């Protein structure tokens, strides 16, 4: 797909605040600080569309961005950040789980994994959750530019060997733009579903 317009639509802190299910939703999930906001900005070409932060664990809302008139990109709260309080974590995890479980409009989940340490236990738990609920998902290995050639081969192998049912694995760097066109090409199929 070619993105010609990308605009913030709405933020929701509960399922009741989500928009009507009129467009397919491509959902972005991953641990805090994995590079989700940065990916949304580089993918759409709109700087500052999603807020990036060097302080992890800040985004606790489900954020909707309208892409062309084709679909929504949905930015989910990051998971796996230890400094968030236990109660808050539970509420927040619950929102994430119930959204992923119940929302019919979801056609694809894009799971971001940090290519320096892919497949951490919380990531594996997320993959199992998505597979259990039969949600199609693809994997993006972020911050690929930070790896040596040898580490790149290892990261890829590690993800491929964890038994994932991911529909695709894309290596991504927001700095070089690597992976951008490959990822957008995958989206076409899921938008037309
Ligand atoms: N070198 C490099 N840094 C990145 C990349 N993507 C994100 N970052 C950095 O990682 C940090 C966290 O990014 P952010 O997008 O806010 O993560 P989020 O919490 O998942 O939304 C920021 O300092 C980004 O500049 C990348 O592809 N390469
Ligand atoms: Mg973010």
Image (cartoon, rainbow, N blue to C red):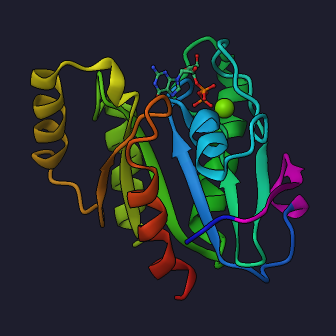
Question: Which of the two residues, 162 or 44, is positioned nearer the viewer here?
Answer: 44
Identify which residue is drawn at 84% across, 63% down. 18
In the rendered structure, which segment of residues is drawn in magenta?
Answer: 4-17
Identify which residue is drawn at 24% across, 63% down. 165
Q: Is residue 135 visible?
A: no
Q: Quadrant of the N terminus?
A: bottom right
- Residue 54 vs 112, above or below: the answer is above
Report the image quarter containing ligand 2: top right
Q: On the picture, is 57 further left or further right than 116?
A: right
Please state the horizontal and vertical placement of residue 185, each as a whole percent of the image.
43, 69
Q: Is residue 182 visible?
A: yes
Numbered disc total: 0
Residue 143 occupies quadrant:
top left
- Residue 109 vs 172, above or below: the answer is below
- Residue 38 vs 132, above or below: the answer is above
Whether 11 is among the magenta residues is yes
Residue 122 occupies quadrant:
top left
Identify which residue is drawn at 69% across, 16% down. 85
Whether 85 is among the magenta residues is no
- Residue 108 vs 12, above or below: the answer is below
Residue 138 occupies quadrant:
bottom left
Identify which residue is drawn at 87% across, 49% down. 11
Please state the horizontal and vertical placement of residue 119, each as a whole percent of the image.
28, 35
In the displayed image of the protein, which residue is found farthest to the bottom? Answer: 193
Please state the horizontal and vertical placement of residue 135, each as a whole percent of the image.
44, 69
Question: Which of the two residues, 86 or 66, is positioned nearer the viewer here?
Answer: 66
């Amino acid at each position: 797909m070619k993105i010609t317009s990308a605009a913030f639509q709405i933020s929701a802190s509960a399922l009741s605040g989500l928009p009507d299910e009129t467009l397919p939703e491509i959902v972005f999930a991953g641990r805090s600080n994995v590079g989700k906001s940065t990916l949304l900005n580089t993918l759409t070409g709109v700087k500052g569309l999603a807020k990036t932060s060097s302080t992890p664990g800040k985004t606790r809302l489900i954020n909707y961005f309208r892409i062309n008139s084709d679909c929504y990109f949905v930015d989910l709260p990051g998971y796996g950040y230890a400094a968030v309080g236990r109660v808050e974590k539970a509420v927040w995890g619950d929102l994430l789980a119930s959204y992923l479980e119940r929302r019919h409009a979801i056609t694809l989940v894009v799971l971001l994994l940090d290519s320096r340490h892919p497949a951490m236990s919380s990531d594996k738990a997320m993959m199992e959750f998505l597979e259990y609920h039969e949600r199609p998902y693809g994997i993006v290995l972020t911050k690929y530019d930070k790896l040596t050639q040898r580490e790149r081969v290892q990261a890829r192998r590690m993800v491929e060997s964890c038994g994932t049912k991911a529909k695709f694995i894309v290596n991504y760097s927001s700095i070089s733009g690597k992976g951008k066109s490959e990822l957008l090409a995958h989206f076409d199929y899921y938008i037309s579903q």
